[in-house]
Image (tube, grey):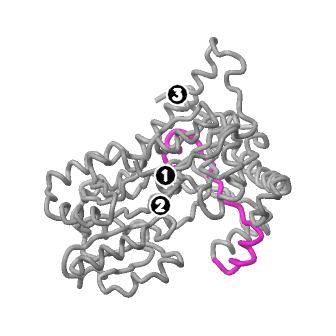
């Protein structure tokens, strides 16, 4: 389908490298872009701390070989899709306190210049011109890329409220509103995050989320994984990173202790809080560790009920969990914590406000599951594929171009905010 921006090349920057071992919105979107556009996907560059602390890790070793010029940084990974590993090392500056915002800003601009120089080498090698810059939630490294790379269009894509936690909070609460404001177009995957973007940029659009089309294809029941073969009774499963900033450890303990006949199966890497948790003392809680993405559907097929046991906080309340679409694509009943972001699933999942409701909904889901319900869930997930999601992104870009290029456009009506004038959104409830 021809568009206003047909033939435009796209440069993608973001938080996740191409060789990430977990599911990645950014990678899936880049792959979909490459069906119609040439795409240059930029790996996150090394920084001093990563080099010092992770020098022996294979991924760091590979990137250091690029920095030393021993191997090329540009690689063709699929038709129309190249990955660039930057040949630079950035300074580690996030330890600077918020009170030294001016110094942080100066050093961050130095980092951005190094990053931009490396990206420019890839752009020149591929002869990209009049390209679109698509920034997946990368606040610091990519803060100055619009003015350094001069893209034809700059897009900030927000899929997680990262400035509410940890590494991103100290300087992100100052810098994310500013990068949203100076981007030409902002896209968000949930209504909550779109409202946040609109505080700083009137050209902000909700584009929703996607899931893997392959999950929707007819498939036979896979052989039961070895770790599940000895389990007696229903399997209540979760797939994804196990981090206490997002997931309710207390809720999982409650479910396991209240119903010892249920098997609580957790598939994914654990953070330190999960590793230290009492859950490891419970015989009906099973930690299976990180599995290859290709194997995850096999585990989900053998779950009787799927969980999304989120805490309710600023990080999660507006989050669109891609795993829920993936569960539904396989026809599975889903019991999840009610948040604003989960509202899109309200007619196809069981949304609980309390631990007691979680337990009651698990029992209800076990009792009333049926082939008809499974098909309904599958059909709903089919409305959220990556092609459909990227079509919505294209529509938002088309609308932006049409408005920008309209002969009736008034000079100055695309005025940006130089600095944020209000504080980030603060959640008040799960509603």
Q: Earlier in the sequence, mark 2 or mark 1?
A: 2
Q: Residues within 10 Å of mark 1 (few under 14, many from 20)?
A: some
Residue 28's disc is 1
Residue at the image point whose x is 68% and y is 25% from the top: 414
Q: Report how far apart the C-alphas of labels 1 and 3 lie in the structure.
A: 21 Å
Q: Report how far apart the C-alphas of labels 2 and 1 lie in the structure.
A: 8 Å
| Of the pair 217 and 101, the residue shown nearer to us | 101
Residue 155 lies in quadrant: top right
Q: Earlier in the sequence, mark 3 or mark 2?
A: 3
Residue located farthest toward the top when viewing the structure as drawn = 408
Provide residue 258's location: percent of width, then percent of height. Answer: 26, 77
Q: Does residue 304 appear left or right of residue 40 in this picture? A: left
Location of residue 183 with respect to 97 vertically, above or below: above
Determine whether label 2 and label 1 are within 8 Å by CB.
yes
Q: Does residue 359 appear left or right of residue 407 in this picture? A: left
Residue 306 lies in quadrant: bottom left
Residue 89 visible, this angle? no
**Residue that mark 2 sits on:** 23
- Residue 318 counted in the magenta span: no
| Of the pair 219 and 206, the residue shown nearer to us | 206
- Residue 40 counted in the magenta span: yes
Determine whether label 1 and label 3 are within 8 Å by CB.
no
Which span is picked out in magenta?
A: 31-57
Residue 3's disc is 3
């Amino acid at each position: 389908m021809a568009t206003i921006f047909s033939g435009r090349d796209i440069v993608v920057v973001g938080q996740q490298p191409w060789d990430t071992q977990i599911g990645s919105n950014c990678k899936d979107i880049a792959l979909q872009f490459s069906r119609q556009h040439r795409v240059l996907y930029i790996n996150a560059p090394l920084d001093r701390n990563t080099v010092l602390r992770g020098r022996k890790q294979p991924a760091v070793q590979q990137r250091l070989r690029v920095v030393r010029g021993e191997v090329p940084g540009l690689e063709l990974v699929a038709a129309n899709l190249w990955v660039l590993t930057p040949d630079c090392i950035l300074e580690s500056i996030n330890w600077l306190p918020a009170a030294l915002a001016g110094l942080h800003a100066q050093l961050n601009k130095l980092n951005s210049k190094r990053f931009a120089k490396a990206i420019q080498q890839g752009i020149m090698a591929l002869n990209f011109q009049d390209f679109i810059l698509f920034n997946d939630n990368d606040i610091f490294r990519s803060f100055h890329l619009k003015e350094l790379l001069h893209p034809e269009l700059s897009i900030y894509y927000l899929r997680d409220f990262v400035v509410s936690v940890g590494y991103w909070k100290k300087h992100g609460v100052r810098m994310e509103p500013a990068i949203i404001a100076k981007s030409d177009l902002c896209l968000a995957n949930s209504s909550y995050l779109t409202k946040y973007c609109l505080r700083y940029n009137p050209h902000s659009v909700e584009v929703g989320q996607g899931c893997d089309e392959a999950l929707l294809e007819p498939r036979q029941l896979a052989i039961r994984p070895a770790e599940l073969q000895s389990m007696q009774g229903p399997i209540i499963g979760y797939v994804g990173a196990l981090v206490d900033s997002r997931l309710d450890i207390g809720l999982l303990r409650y479910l396991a202790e209240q119903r010892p006949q249920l098997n609580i199966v957790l598939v994914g890497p654990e953070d330190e809080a999960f590793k230290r948790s009492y859950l490891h003392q419970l015989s009906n809680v099973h930690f299976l560790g990180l599995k290859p993405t290709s194997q995850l559907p096999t585990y989900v097929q053998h779950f009787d009920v799927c969980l999304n046991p989120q805490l309710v906080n600023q990080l999660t309340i507006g989050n669109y969990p891609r795993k829920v679409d993936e569960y539904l694509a396989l026809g599975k009943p889903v019991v999840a914590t009610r948040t604003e972001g989960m509202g899109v699933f309200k007619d196809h999942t069981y949304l609980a406000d309390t631990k007691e409701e979680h337990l009651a909904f698990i029992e209800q889901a076990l009792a009333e599951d049926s082939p008809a319900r499974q098909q309904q869930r599958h059909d709903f997930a089919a409305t959220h594929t990556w092609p459909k999601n990227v079509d919505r992104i294209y529509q938002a870009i088309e609308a932006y171009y049409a408005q920008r290029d309209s002969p009736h456009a008034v000079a100055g009506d695309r005025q940006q905010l130089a600095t944020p004038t209000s504080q980030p959104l603060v959640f008040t409830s799960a509603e």
